[in-house]
Image (spheres, rainbow, N blue to C red):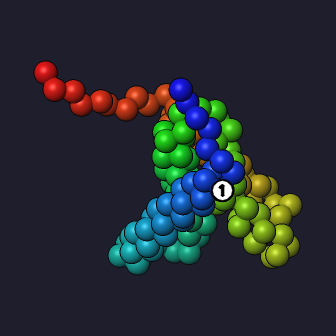
């Protein structure tokens, strides 16, 4: 029988997978910064690479969360991706750029990657190793 976990366990799981997304985002940002410095790129590519890094973090954290949960992948993906999209939205409001189309597209891209990760996490099969 499947037993549903309580609210504190769900919240802890949400936070742990959110931290995973932040860690992946930070690693991707560091890698992209190294790439930019090594290639001598201009600052105009920084927003694109930063959005890509946050989308990578969103995709991987929602994929892992949905893979562990195995139910309601899209909902899990969208809720988990808000962990990374919310700071983007708050910083846009703080800077006064919340109404700009580029900012809205970045936030939607993070949510889209989260939804995709959630759907993929539910559909992936776990391999069970059996002795033959």
The crowding category of the residue bearing disc 1, from other C-alpha atoms within 10 Å (few below 14, some 14 to 19, many at least 20), is few
User: Which residue appears at 75% of the width and 72% of the height?
Assistant: 91
Front-most of residues 38 and 20: 20
User: Which residue appears at 61% of the width and 44% of the height?
Assistant: 5
Q: Position of residue 12 (x, y in %)?
A: 60, 58
- Residue 36 visible, this angle: no
- 30 in relation to 71, above or below: below
Q: Residue furthest top?
A: 132
Q: Position of residue 30 (x, y in %)?
A: 44, 73
- Tell me where residue 83 sits by quadrant: bottom right
- 97 in relation to 102, above or below: below
Q: Position of residue 33 (x, y in %)?
A: 45, 74
**For this view, does 43 lie left or right of residue 128?**
right
User: Which residue appears at 77% of the width and 55% of the height?
Assistant: 104
**For this view, does 112 lie left or right of residue 89?**
left
- 94 in relation to 115, above or below: below
Number of dots carrying numbers? 1
Element carrying mark 1 = helix
Q: Residue furthest left?
A: 132
User: Which residue appears at 61% of the width and 66% of the height?
Assistant: 47
- Tell me where residue 46 sits by quadrant: bottom right
Q: Position of residue 2 (x, y in %)?
A: 55, 30
**For this view, does 17 lie left or right of residue 125?**
right
> Which corner quadrant holds the C terminus?
top left
- Residue 7 visible, this angle: yes
- 29 in relation to 48, above or below: below
**For this view, does 44 lie left or right of residue 91?**
left
Q: Which residue is mark 1?
A: 8
């Amino acid at each position: 029988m499947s037993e549903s976990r309580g609210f504190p366990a769900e919240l802890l799981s949400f936070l742990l997978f959110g931290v995973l997304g932040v860690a992946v985002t930070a690693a991707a940002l560091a890698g992209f910064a190294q790439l930019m410095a090594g290639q001598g790129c201009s600052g105009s590519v920084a927003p694109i690479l930063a959005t890509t890094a946050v989308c990578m973090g969103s995709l991987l954290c929602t994929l892992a969360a949905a893979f562990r949960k195995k139910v309601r992948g899209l909902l899990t993906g969208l809720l988990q991706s808000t962990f990374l999209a919310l700071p983007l939205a708050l910083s846009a409001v703080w800077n006064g750029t919340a109404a700009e189309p580029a900012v809205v597209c970045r936030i939607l891209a993070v949510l889209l990657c989260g939804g995709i990760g959630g759907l993929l996490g539910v559909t992936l099969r776990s391999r069970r190793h059996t002795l033959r």
